[in-house]
Amino acid sequence: MRLRKRRGKAPEPSETENKDEGSPEERQDRIGDRLEETVGRLQDKFGGNDDFVLCRFQVYGRIPAAMFYYSSMVDSTAVNEVILKPLMLGSPASEQEGGESGSLPHRLIDDILYHSGCTTEGRYSALVGAIVRGQTVIVVEGETEAIVVQTRSIDKRSIDTPATEQVIRGPREGFIEMLSTNMALLRYRLQTPEFHIQTMEIGRKTMSKVAVCYIEGVTNAELVKEVRDRVSRIDIDAVLDSGYLEQFIEDNHISPFPQVQYTERPDKVVANLLEGRVAILVDGSPLALVVPTVFSQFYQTVEDYTERFLLMSAVRMARFVALIFSLVFPSLYVAIISFNPELIPTEFAVAVAGGRAGVPFPAVIEVLVIEIAMEVLREATIRLPQQVGGALSIVGVLVVGQAAVAAGFVSPITVVIIALTTIGSFATPAFNVALALRLLRFPLIIMAGIFGLYGVMIGLILIANHLLSLKSFGVPYLSPLVPSDSSGLKDLLVRGPLWWMQKRPAFLRPKETDRVRPGLGKRIMAGTDNVLDPARQEKKER
């Protein structure tokens, strides 16, 4: 006995009985019962494409029909073996089995086609959309409904290690461009019915499929609604990457700091979903968006949680120091050299003065020129082929830097300061935050050259005030520091033990707050029974 296949929603009686009702546009959009008319309309729409296929055949060997698809987007073997062959070789007795119980397209789906992804559609615009998405459309003479079969098959690259978020200890899988594969990677890690994925189409020309992912019962329902509302309001011709969506849904569009986190690691997305956040995937993009986002997320990595907490707490602190270091070190150098040299120890001041002897530019100009040159060198290294980029970086740093010092254009201490600053920016895990800090270095250097240490402090106060004013989907950007949350502070500058972090972040307002069983930490801290301890064995023998 053949399994019943999932079919599309059947037309309501009111729709079939009153086909002449409705606006002229709706009547024009309906499929007529004449096969040649539908074929003509679809040929007029797609006939100029070399990969568009129109295949005429006869259902049961006697009923004229036509099949439409893009050969570059479908599995030709499935089209021939699973769709075309059963329809042509189906017994006419199968047509009589259904009697008057349903239309011919529905009977073909239920009794003839060997495919579970079949639906019926009665609108011409829906058929056009189905064809451009890689589906196969079948139109039968005398029927006002067409059959749409899911036959999309596009070549894709294999799942590989993420290029921008490599870890020593952790999964090696990364997202690819195919949305279906990315959703499968998430479901592989979240094998629970509470994990929900809701899709929509954004882009008037591209009709890109966008997936909103969350965990029902954990994520705040208002947050999910807000994310869906912001995404659905986007009206643009094309969505070619998740970065298009990010620029539309963020709260502050002129801030240098990102309010949406992106990642190509499925395990990182799952960890954020379990905290109560929402993930957004875009078909054609290997990067997922995670909202809401707070500043502390940008200097945390997957290894912070896969390694022991004492070691990774020290590494996280070093990473945070490098982040601050890359922002303020050049401006502090300019301020101290230009306005407050008395703050430098005497021996070091003599060495600095000797290195700057003969340099024709003031410290602020010198630092700005080297910073700009370093940014140009970094951009050139990224754009060049990988085999050439590494060699260029070595030549640029060693040869050009040494030549500039020997020629007297810059001092050796300035080259050291800029090199340490660049290394500190590389220690920031998130590229978009490192880019923001690189941008903010320049106004800080200029203010330090004009006002000295006062200018540096004024600049840092302005940056701090800006960070305090930022929000991501209503969540303060500096949470859980401001406003303070005692449970969230356990995972801020240091990473506490996993059994200490019993609650999900309170600023996300999750429905389910507990993520660790109550009392588990006490049992772990109490220790376990050391069954192989020699002292325990001797005591037992006595």
Image (cartoon, grey):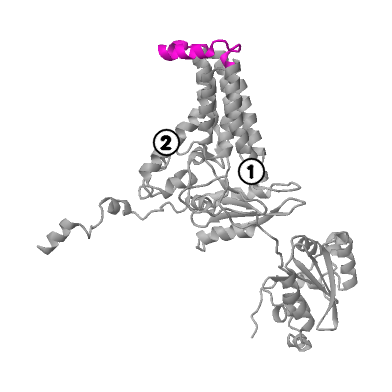
357 and 326: which is toward the camera: 357
Is residue 446 visible from the viewing direction of this image? no
On whether residue 23 falls in the magenta region, the answer is no
Q: Residue furthest bottom?
A: 93
**Numbered badge on residue 246:** 1
Q: Residue at x 45, y 54 (%)?
A: 512
Say if 104 sits above or below 332 in the image: below
Left or right of 499 on screen, residue 8? right
Which residue carries the number 2 mark?
A: 317
Q: Secondary structure at mark 2?
A: helix
**Residue 270 on image: x %, y %:** 51, 53
Say if 95 sits above or below 295 in the image: below
Q: Which residues are magenta?
A: 338-364
**Residue 69 on image: x %, y %:** 79, 66
Q: Amino acid at mark 2?
A: Met
**Numbered badge on residue 29:** none
- N-term-proximal mark, 1 vs 2: 1
On whether residue 363 falls in the magenta region, the answer is yes
**Residue 365 on image: x %, y %:** 61, 16
**Is the N terminus in the top left, top right, bottom left or bottom right quadrant?**
bottom right
Q: Amino acid at mark 1?
A: Glu
**Residue 146 on image: x %, y %:** 79, 71
Left or right of 312 on screen, residue 430? right
Q: Residue at x 48, y 42 (%)?
A: 300
Q: Residue at x 39, y 38 (%)?
A: 314
Say if 325 sits above or below 130 in the image: above
272 and 364: which is toward the camera: 364
Task: Tell me the chief SS of the magenta region.
Answer: helix
Q: Quadrant of residue 430?
A: top right
Q: Secondary structure at mark 1?
A: helix
Give the spatial CA distance, label 1 vs label 2.
29 Å
